[in-house]
Image (cartoon, rainbow, N blue to C red):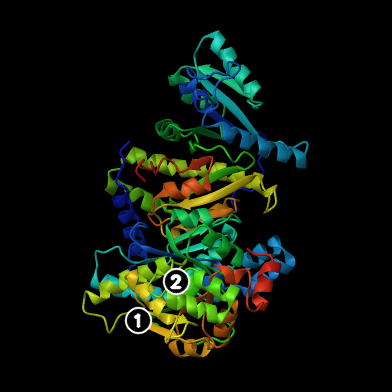
């Protein structure tokens, strides 16, 4: 039997698809070329009400509810503005490099049953999102699929899945429903990172926890020129940097639609040096580096208005969220075993059933 | 739902002996009691698990799988070997057929087989071409999943309209091939109706039968159409995957289906 080339077949189906749709959709790029961001359904959409039904009344009632409300699109969830901004970057990249496949690819990665599929697809359509790839695993772990897609970043509302992903070496963070919602840019993607145990390993944090602040300063000064080991989100910063270079190459440094921030409790006068030198040794940089010397991160983030802020400590995550920043928890390193504050969200994650 | 008639009576599945047993390993096998296990082994075990659970729920259940095994003509000794091996592994095979290759189609037709499964893509295509429902047996290397039967339906075949299938002629598919795809879709529907009935006898969680929709090329809306269509046919899929052209193999390696109903459309190249 004649076996047509896969690529031809794909173009054929898309041509057929685009004939019926009003706006011409771009072709999804090949997974090996892209920066894959996997988002769970509850990270992308607000499913708080449905989650309550699941927890209180069980799977059957939950699925029935979803099917009954199939034609009602979900409202945006915590990762929604981030995904929209990512798509805006893609649009700019396509303009400048029409043949390149070095783009972001957002994949919906949910352990929901396919019964919820139609409501999710309807919601994606309603919000005009460019999500063509998804896995609805019907209750199974998404980890295998994350690997199959060479996922660069996984965002989920389920801390257990995020923890599993981190343990498997996949950059991941838990996002939480926001209380206060802050307006963020629709044209510039802003990503803020904590330093220790996020971009860097937790080695210095261990010293601080074991021996206190003075010892920490001493250690950092002594090892100023020795780069820290890398943390779980170093790869993602690297990927963002690669895309930024593509804009710089076309003379768009000032107008770059990606901006990165380091927001660290280290202080500029002392321990901050090692952080910057480490980044430099990796050939990486952030557009801005904010050394708070232990001051709360919330107010600074409120000014920056990033689409997402990654931190390994729930204390900072909650502080940021209180002031309207979408803060994501990276469950990595020593802080997980000895949290400085037991957040109510951490308790809630462990006791509630998760989808 | 279009087909309101509730089906009773066995769901006949046919497979070939060279899928059930690994004849390549025959010369090197040290086990003289039974033929070495082949690629269809986990499939058969999973089918039996579904049957066991159905009977657990209802002792007089009639909608059960029934498996027939087809082998080529061979010596009486070998025939005995096959039957003994089946018994050795505790496999429930309803009937054995020993026939020439040319007689395969007739055998399938006369038994009103509801699904013919094979690892041989050409055999699957030929069966579909003569109107026999057929599916590709996934020749996965590992044999973990014994207690859950996983069936994949192609979202592309189910989701694309008749017109779209017609315009496949632009791509060098012949009219005969296109008619085969359309016929395969109808056969797929018949099988989906039966599987749907079976699936409904189990709850949402802990079911020994799991159905998936895999859309390889179609967009999310094609996948949505496929899900809606399956629901009209009485089947609510458990899992759904939309690849938008991404390679299938890595995903299939995680899904680990036993059988793929794709109407012969995909012919997934080895490189993918």
Regarding residue B5, the answer to whether it shows in the image is no
Regarding residue A279, the answer to whether it shows in the image is yes
Front residue (pair A73, A133): A133
Q: Which quadrant of the figure has residue A116?
A: bottom right
In x, y percent, where is residue A31?
37, 57
Left or right of B186, for residue B45: right
Mark 2 lies on a secondary structure that is: helix
Note whether B143 is above or below B226 in the view shown: above
Tell me the residue at 67%/34% (across/down).
B9
Q: Residues within 10 Å of mark 1 (few under 14, many from 20)?
A: few
**Which quarter shows the C terminus of chain A?**
bottom right
Front residue (pair B171, A49): A49
In x, y percent, where is residue A279?
37, 73
Q: Chain of mark 1?
A: A
Looking at the rendered structure, the number of numbered marks drawn on it comes to: 2
Report the residue marked by disc 1.
Answer: A287
Report the residue marked by disc 2.
Answer: A199
Left or right of A134, for residue B1: right
| Residues tagged by mark 2 and mark 1 found on one chain of the structure | yes
């Amino acid at each position: 039997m004649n076996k047509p080339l896969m690529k031809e077949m794909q173009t054929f189906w898309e041509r057929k698809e685009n004939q019926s749709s009003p706006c011409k959709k771009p072709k999804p790029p090949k997974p090996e070329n892209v920066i894959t961001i996997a988002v769970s359904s509850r990270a992308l959409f607000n499913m708080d009400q449905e989650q309550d039904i699941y927890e209180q009344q069980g799977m059957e009632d939950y699925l029935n509810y979803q099917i009954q409300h199939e034609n009602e699109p979900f409202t945006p969830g915590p990762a929604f503005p981030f995904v929209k901004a990512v798509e805006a970057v893609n649009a700019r990249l396509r303009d400048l490099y029409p043949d390149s496949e070095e783009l972001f690819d957002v994949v919906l990665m949910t352990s929901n049953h396919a019964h919820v599929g139609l409501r999710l697809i309807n919601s994606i359509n309603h919000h005009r999102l460019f999500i063509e790839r998804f896995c609805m695993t019907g209750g199974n772990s998404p980890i295998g699929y994350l690997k199959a897609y060479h996922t660069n970043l996984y965002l989920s509302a389920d801390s257990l899945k995020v923890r599993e992903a981190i343990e498997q070496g996949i950059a991941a963070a838990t996002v939480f429903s926001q209380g206060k919602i802050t307006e963020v840019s629709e044209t510039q993607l802003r990503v803020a990172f904590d330093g220790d145990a996020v971009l860097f390993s937790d080695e210095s944090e261990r010293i601080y926890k074991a021996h206190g602040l003075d010892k920490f300063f001493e250690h950092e000064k002594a090892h100023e020129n020795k780069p820290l080991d890398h943390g779980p989100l170093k790869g993602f910063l690297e990927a963002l940097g690669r895309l930024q270079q593509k804009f710089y190459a076309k003379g768009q440094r000032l107008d770059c639609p990606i901006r990165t921030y380091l927001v660290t409790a280290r202080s500029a006068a002392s321990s901050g040096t090692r952080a910057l030198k480490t980044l430099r040794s990796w050939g990486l940089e952030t557009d801005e580096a904010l050394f708070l010397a232990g001051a709360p991160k919330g107010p600074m983030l409120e000014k920056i208005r990033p689409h997402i802020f990654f931190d390994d400590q729930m204390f900072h995550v909650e502080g940021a969220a209180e002031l309207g920043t979408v803060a994501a928890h990276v469950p990595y390193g020593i802080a997980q075993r000895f949290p400085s504050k037991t957040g109510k969200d951490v308790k809630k994650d462990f006791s509630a059933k998760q989808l | 739902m279009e087909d309101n008639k509730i089906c009773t009576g066995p769901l006949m599945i046919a497979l070939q002996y060279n899928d059930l047993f690994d004849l390549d390993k025959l010369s090197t096998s040290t086990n003289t009691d039974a033929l070495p296990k082949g690629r269809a082994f986990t499939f058969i075990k999973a089918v039996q698990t579904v049957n066991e659970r159905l009977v657990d729920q209802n002792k007089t259940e009639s909608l059960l799988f029934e498996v027939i095994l087809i082998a080529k003509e061979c010596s009486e000794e070998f025939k005995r070997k096959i039957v003994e091996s089946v018994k050795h592994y505790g496999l429930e095979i309803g009937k054995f057929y020993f026939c020439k290759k040319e007689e395969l189609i007739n055998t399938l037709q006369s038994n009103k087989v509801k699904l013919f499964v094979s690892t041989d893509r050409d055999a699957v295509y030929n069966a579909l071409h003569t109107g026999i429902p057929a599916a590709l047996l996934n020749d996965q290397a590992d044999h973990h999943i014994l207690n859950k039967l996983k069936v994949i339906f192609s979202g592309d075949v189910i989701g694309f309209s008749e017109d779209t299938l017609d315009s496949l002629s632009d791509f060098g598919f012949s009219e005969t091939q296109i008619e085969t795809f359309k016929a395969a879709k109808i056969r797929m529907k018949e099988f989906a109706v039966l599987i749907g009935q079976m699936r409904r006898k189990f709850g949402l969680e802990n079911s020994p039968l799991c159905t998936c929709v895999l859309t390889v090329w179609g967009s999310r809306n094609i996948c949505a159409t496929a899900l809606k269509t399956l629901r009209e046919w009485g089947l609510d899929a458990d899992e759904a995957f939309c690849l938008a052209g991404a390679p299938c193999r890595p995903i299939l390696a995680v899904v680990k289906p036993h059988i793929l109903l794709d109407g012969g459309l995909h012919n997934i190249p080895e490189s993918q």
